[in-house]
Amino acid sequence: MYLYDELDRTLVAERVAEFRDQVARRLSGELTEDEFKPLRLMNGVYLQLHAYMLRISIPYGTLSAEQLRMLAHVAQRYDRGYGHFTTRQNIQFHWIKLEQLPEAMADLASVGMHGMQTSGNNVRNITTDQWAGVAPDEIEDPRVFAEVIRQHVTLHPEFSFMPRKFKIAVGASAHDRAALRIHDLALRLHRNDAGEAGFEVMVGGGLGRTPFLAKTIRPFLPTRDVLSYVEAVLRTYNQFGRRDNAWKARIKILVHDLGVEAFAKEVEAEWQSMKDGGLALDPEVFAEIAARFRYPAYERLDDSPPALVQARRAERRFDAWVNNAVTNHKVPGYAIVTLSLKPQGGTPGDATAEQMQAIADLAERYSFGEIRVGHEQNLVLPHVAQHDLAALWRALDEAGLATPNVGLVSDIIACPGLDYCSLANARSIPVAQEIASRFRNLDVAQNLGRLHINISGCINACGHHHVGHIGILGVEKNDEEFYQITIGGRADEEARLGTLIGPAVRYGEVADVVEDIVAAYLELRERPQETFPQVVQRTGIEPFKERVYAAR
Amino acid sequence: MPLVKHGRIVADSYVRVADDAPVTDDAAVIVPAARFLADAGALVQRGTPTGVLWPNDRRISELAPWLDRLALVALAFPIFRDGRAYSQARQLRERYGFRGELRATGDVLRDQFLFLIRAGFDSLEVKKDADAAAFAEAVGRYSVFYQPSADGRVPMARQRLLSRSERSTAGAVQPARSAPAFVDSD
Amino acid sequence: MTSPLQQKLKISGPVVVTANRLADGAVVYLSADRAWTTELADATVTTSAPVAQELLAAAKGDRLRAVDPYVAPVRVAANGSVQPGNLRESIRSAGPTIELPATG
């Protein structure tokens, strides 16, 4: 848990004061909407279908209980009692009033939270693995580097008016849980043969109208050089990214147009001129930031305490939940717990203010006061003692936060879609709900194994549909909602883009189509452990295409 | 269009020369880039200060050979959202060590003043009178910064390593780094 | 349902001018006397392109109260009641089509 200090809080407070002034100047007419819009976007304030939407930054998806309580307060006081966790580890409130924003932001600032750079053509939230710091397979906590970079790019004078947004992700394990390759810039911490830690630098990922996976431009960058190298990439992008067409302005287009080698050369040339300047990561400065990451005072505990074993035997539902939502922790006797925000009939990723309060309380009691947000729109309690799991589960179950569907077919990732978003062509939430309803039987869902369905309501792809095992994209045809279906995408270390299986289908047919695809998978898989994307890779899309379109 | 330089509204001592207009010897001039490059050798040997208006889509490296003899470089913001000149400004100051006047022109608005100063600009052709009058307020909005930058203020990471007493002066704006090659007439 | 702000002005049936209220983002419709109402029933409906153009221009000039105005289709029922003309406008008018999370 990173502890903000007086200086961090001063910056946020000054930002609140600045925005308060900007809102006042807009409301008085001194600023036009054209002048105000980029300013409010730089604070995460969007205008959506029904109201303003406020997106609040949750740096690398890490929250304290105190901060989560404040989010609950904002939901209750300024919104309609709930919030939505996003695919970039942030939270959104959909019913905000502009005139109340300065107050809401002042409340958030009191716990070090803000909406800075959650929108606009700047560097957005730096995301990482929701199990960072506790996953057994990571080499070091990537969040320290994420924080170093976050500070550097916050209100950066050079990179606040770039051609388009810029998304960075940092990972530190071979198994990629942060969807690195769909980011503009991805940094994967690993060790070279000499045992030194450094970054594989990948650039040019991004979804949307022209999806690309990021390409490696530098296999090993010593950690001391990370800030100067990030600046070199950003400067190259700021100077040469397209400004004439918003659909072609991301860095992925620049990398594609120049070619990876030419692009890398530009970055290297820029970097050579600045690498030994003031941005070399000073060990003292790094140590100071690292020291403000507080880690729990873990007790010395044993794995599989008898109480846990007994409870699992005694209660089938608890056992099913442990199998599904609880994973190994790097410290013996502890566990990582995922809270599904995908209950039957709910909106994927939403949590009520009451639930947020409950989770904050449980985090204090069972997780050293810390919560994580994952890009799959679920929450995590990262430091739970195994002997506390039964008590935790009972509380979560009561609060509707213990659906054992994590990573399963009904753990659907969906953007808000046309029910909320002014960019959308079609709805995504009711589609997700209908699909989840078809697979509400947990035994059926378990039997299918890991299966990621991603739904986006428009080509901006906030639902990350391109990298879903099953991807669903809402489009509009003659004022009616249609959906394109892709299969075989992956967001992990074997990232790939899904393949379109055929013509778009109507709103009312999507759930049937998904059932057909799932049925085909069950017939085709050679053994239960062969996952959906593995089958698609082996068989290609033809058998699925046939099954879906035979009768349509 | 008021000119704000080193925090004050001042008269502009430079004359903008159109593409084909003659360059006189009795005034400080700002010459468009193409014109400058076509005749750079002569232009930098003038008795009065020479400046160039450089577009935001040309590399600064092209201007590099002349920087030690240019009194002023003016960079362009066709629209405030087009931030290419921020990168040009930093390259001029930090990579090429340009110490002359660095001027922001075009769609220069209040809410970008602080970014501009921190990127290395020391004079701004401000679009709105009201914004020019509010310059001090605009750049005074923040007392802490994460990044090292051209205005000399100590970044937060460094501030944390200072003692409390040192910290209280670290946030103040240092005098501008640039020292003009010619005497200002303001 | 592509944002009407990106479309050229096309009128083929009855339309209203709609926007979001500056202060709170609420959906509003231009009514008589160039006022803004949250009730579609009170909106000024026109089938004339020049009139729509004029209303839109007036709305765009009202920078203090409304943001991003545009012309939206409506349907006029036999009994004269005005209904939203497409799914997007229905959602803007009536709110999300899903049940909002229960609040305590």
Image (cartoon, coloured by chain):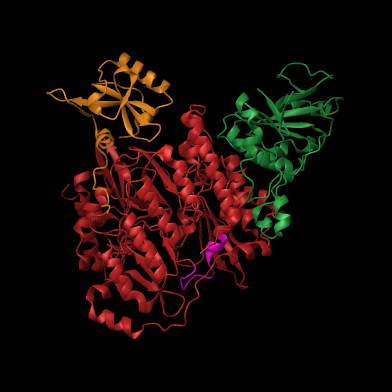
Chain colours: A red, B green, C orange
In magenta segment, residue A135 = yes
- Total numbered labels: 0
Region rendered in magenta: A133-145
Residue C11: % across, % down: 28, 21
Tell me which residue sits at (70%, 40%) in the image: B120
Residue A494 appears in the figure: no
Question: Is residue C62 or residue A207 the one in the foreground?
Answer: C62
Determine the image quadrant of residue B109.
Answer: top right
Residue A189: % across, % down: 55, 64
Query: What secondary structure characterizes most of the magenta part?
Result: loop
Residue A506: % across, % down: 22, 43
Q: In this image, C94 relative to A185: left or right?
A: left
Residue B67, placed above or below residue A315: above
In magenta segment, residue A268 = no
Tell me which residue sits at (43%, 25%) in the image: C63
The residue positioned farthest toward the top in the image shown: C50
Tell me which residue sits at (50%, 70%) in the image: A138
Residue A412, placed above or below residue B102: below
Determine the image quadrant of residue B65.
Answer: top right
The residue positioned farthest toward the left in the image shown: C79
Question: Is residue A455 or residue A422 the one in the foreground?
Answer: A422
